[in-house]
Image: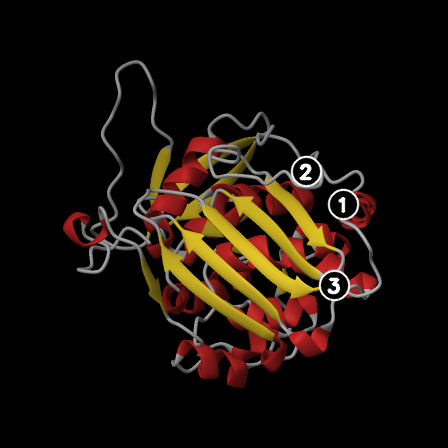
């Protein structure tokens, strides 16, 4: 059994990592406490908890951890990653710290300076459906954001195939459960603010936008994105609007997706006119895609659904770990 470390295991994505890794047949999770208030979770009778160690570079080296997951805020990932890499660890980072290619782009969208610009050139973007060849040999894999995962899996095949009238733009209307905001308590995500409510946020300036532009090779003027908060705990559903060019039916769009994702274990393409929902992807690593097209006007709609804590975070991180360690990509996830 390979031992793998988890920093930030008390957060929502970190706890999801622990849950999935405990059933993985080839790895043993180790909880790495990087601060005094890192809780270990309540013990359950007759069910041993994963080992818990205080994080130090010396521990990383001596325990010979195969991979370390950083389920931490971006600033913490930037602080911890260099010493971990120096200690011989390989990293899957779930934050936004290493997703963008330049420090300038990071600062423009995250409104904070990047403290480890040298690692941006090394980091591999961990969207396996598009970056699979680069992941196995990487020391540092940057796990994609939840919104960009659902968006890029829906949009990039369309751009690659040249079936989007880019002059008309692409509109992505995205809705997420509250766990996407993380576990840290805030007024905006408190029960009384969220329940019975529905709100848009970070309009035209959401920090996940550059991941979509970067991966689907779009210009900012071509892509409009709005994030909205659903009064539920988990799940992302994105409704994507565009003008189609060079295709005459939803069946052609479905065939395009089917061809692009042939053999992909975690992308499911629906029959034309049928749309995915959140219940269908909850607690899974699937991305479900449905589409429709009005041929006379060229109006097309694609719906993409994922679980933000699984395919949008922990599940995709484990998918990347499997590739890095040479395990079957589906191990622990199906």
Residue 9, horizontal then vertical, whole percent? 36, 44
Q: Are marks 2 and 1 in contact (CB under 8 Å)?
A: yes
Residue 206, horizontal then vertical, whole percent? 44, 71
Q: Which residue lies under the disc numbered 2?
A: 270
Taking the spot 20% from the left edge, 50% from the top edge, the residue there is: 37
Q: Is residue 117 above or below residue 138?
A: below
Of all residues, the one furthest to the top in this rendering is: 46
Q: Which mark is residue 254?
A: 1
- Badge 2: residue crowd in 10 Å (few <14, some 14–19, many ≥20): some
Of all residues, the one furthest to the left in this rendering is: 192
Residue 169, horizontal then vertical, whole percent? 64, 73
Instruction: Looking at the image, tell me whether mark 1 or mark 3 is earlier in sequence order.
Output: 3
Taking the spot 42% from the left edge, 49% from the top edge, the residue there is: 59
Residue 188, horizontal then vertical, whole percent? 22, 60
Instruction: Looking at the image, tell me whether mark 3 or mark 2 is earlier in sequence order.
Output: 3
| Residue 322 in view here | yes
| Badge count | 3
Instruction: Looking at the image, tell me whether mark 2 or mark 1 is earlier in sequence order.
Output: 1
3D distance between C-alphas at marks 1 and 3: 13 Å
């Amino acid at each position: 059994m390979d031992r793998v470390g988890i920093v930030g295991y008390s957060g929502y994505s970190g706890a999801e990592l622990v849950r999935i890794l405990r059933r993985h047949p080839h790895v043993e999770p180790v909880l790495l406490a990087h601060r005094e208030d890192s809780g270990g979770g309540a013990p359950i009778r007759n069910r041993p908890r994963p080992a818990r160690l205080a994080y130090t570079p010396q521990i990383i080296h001596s325990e010979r951890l195969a991979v370390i997951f950083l389920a931490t805020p971006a600033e913490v990932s930037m602080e911890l990653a260099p010493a971990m890499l120096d200690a011989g660890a390989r990293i899957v980072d779930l934050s936004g710290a290493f997703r963008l290619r330049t420090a300038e782009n990071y600062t423009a969208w995250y409104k904070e300076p990047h403290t480890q610009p040298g690692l941006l050139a090394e980091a591999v973007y961990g969207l396996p459906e598009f970056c699979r060849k680069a992941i196995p040999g990487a020391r540092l894999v940057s796990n994609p954001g939840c919104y960009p995962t659902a968006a890029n899996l829906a949009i990039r095949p369309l751009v690659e195939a040249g079936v989007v009238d880019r002059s008309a733009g692409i509109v992505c209307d995205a809705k997420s459960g509250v766990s996407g905001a993380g576990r840290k308590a805030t007024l905006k995500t408190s029960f009384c603010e969220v329940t019975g409510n529905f709100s848009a946020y970070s309009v035209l300036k959401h920090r996940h936008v550059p991941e979509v532009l970067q991966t689907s090779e779009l210009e900012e003027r071509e892509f409009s994105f709005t994030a909205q908060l659903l009064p539920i705990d988990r799940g992302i559903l994105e409704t994507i609007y565009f003008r189609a060019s060079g295709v005459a039916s939803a069946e052609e769009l479905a065939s395009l997706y089917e061809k692009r994702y042939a053999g992909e274990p975690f992308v499911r393409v629906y029959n034309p006119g049928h749309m995915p929902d959140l219940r269908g992807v909850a607690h899974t690593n699937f991305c479900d895609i449905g589409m429709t097209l009005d041929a006379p006007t060229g109006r097309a709609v694609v719906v993409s659904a994922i679980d933000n804590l699984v395919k949008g975070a922990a599940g995709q991180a484990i998918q990347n770990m499997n590739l890095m360690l040479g395990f079957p990509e589906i191990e622990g996830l199906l």
